[in-house]
Image (tube, rainbow, N blue to C red):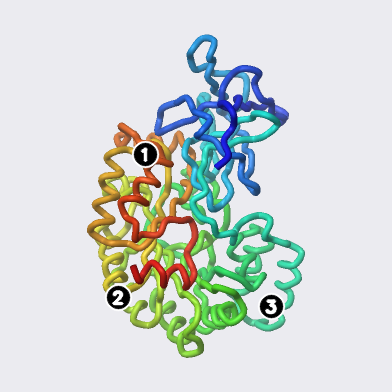
Amino acid sequence: MIHPRKTPKLLYAHDDGSYYDHPYLEAVGRSGNDIVRLKPSDFIPLPEGSEIFLLQGHSAIGFNSRKNEMEVMHNKTAISSFIAPAHTQTYLAASKQKKNAVVLPLYAYSAVGFLDNKLWATAVRVDPDIRQDCDQFDQRMVEKNVLEVKKKFPQNRLLEHIAHCATVYYCPAARNFFLYRWEAPLPTSPACNSRCIGCISWQPKSSGMVSPQNRITFIPTPEEIAELAVFHISHAPDPVVSFGQGCEGEPLHVWETILESIKIMRSKTKEGIINLNTNGSKPHAIEKLVEAGLDSIRISMNSAQEKLYNLYHNPVGYTFSDLAESCKVARRAGKWVSLNYFVFPGITDTVAETEALCRFLDENNPTMIQWRNFNIDPDLYGKIAKDFTGETRGVADLIEFIKKKYPKMYNGYFNPGVEIQKKFLSL
């Protein structure tokens, strides 16, 4: 692991969007609602494919080692990094919110600094999989293949939706479908039974936020779904097809449709992984889907503490215990279960959250944790989770602790293919 020779310098921006490194203020980070100093070992080179964001309405903060104190640059705009997939943020970007600042868009805001002509970010790579590395994509080939696949399935509405995701939103999963490889998306549900504060496909006008993409507006037929799934499985190396995408609601809302599509898929091929990304709200539906041929599920959660889970996800018609039961149902059937665990430094790595996570792992026996960056305004979530701060161990340390405590559980970022699933399910 490469680290800088000393703590990088603070980055700040002017109103015109140009940004600079400060001559002596150190870059600092945010943990929960606290601003903290950072060590050189907290930084890695900014991963390729990451982005730099200007935090409008937020003043930059750095550490003044001459005065041994934090310093707010009231007239300079704070900067963050948006870390590339496969990496997990370990500290948030530090800033001071100005009066009347608008809610930040739904992205993850990680600390970043500058030293020796390099940008450095606070993150760790948690998954060696290259499926969403930026150097793996040729958009010209994607757009060429979109036209070719449309010729094969001219009446398939789901294909039109996925093509839009690949060519307008540049969704990595959608683009991989058109590059005939790895994991492909199967969005199905326009509705949801959660009201997640940071939902990335639907936001009420009152939230002050805009969803990064629009939600699918129709329910594909089982035939439309199966047609694309079987096509992908037959063409892709290490194929995975996944229900439950960022451009839809909760797929279990239409589980009967999914059930019929899986039956069609499995009547045509036994290959590949059929996966469901879900809130786990309907254990009885999970049981039926597993019986039909579903191979794996991924359950999303911001916290293993039920009260904090409810504050963010706002479940409608289901409870945290339903989520846990869905995990048990799939594991009893010998299936792969991942936790889609939203990482918010200073909350995720508290002692209380670590204890709650370990209880959940002990009681429900999932096979994997996906350490995902939490796409939400830090000040917004800081208010939601204000009663759940406390002593922390650090995100990087937490990940290593979980790896050592649960050596038979896989840790990563993506839904794994068949070889990894076979290996860890046999342990």
Proximity of marks 3 and 2: CB atoms separated by less than 8 Å: no
Disc with the residue nearer the chain's start (2 vs 1): 2
Q: Amino acid at mark 2?
A: Ala
Query: Does dot 1 land on a helix, a strand or a loop?
Result: loop
> Which amino acid type is shown beneath numbered disc 1?
Ile
Q: Residues within 10 Å of mark 1 (few under 14, many from 20)?
A: many
One can see residue 55 in this view: no
Q: Quadrant of the C terminus?
A: bottom left
Q: Residue 239, percent across and down?
A: 54, 74
Please give the name of the residue rendered at 65% of the width and 82% of the height, measured from the top-left corner. Answer: 153
Residue in the image at 48% along x and 14% along y? 69
Q: Are marks 3 and 1 in contact (CB under 8 Å)?
A: no
Label 3 vs label 1, nearer the camera: 1
Q: Is residue 290 above or below residue 7?
A: below
Q: What residue is shown at x 44% (from left), y 51% (from top)?
A: 371
**Which residue is tagged 2?**
333
Q: Nearer the viewer, mark 3 or mark 2?
A: 2
Report the residue at 39% width, 78% height from top: 256
Q: Of circles 2 and 1, which is in front?
A: 2
Q: Secondary structure at mark 2?
A: loop
Whether residue 196 can be seen here: yes
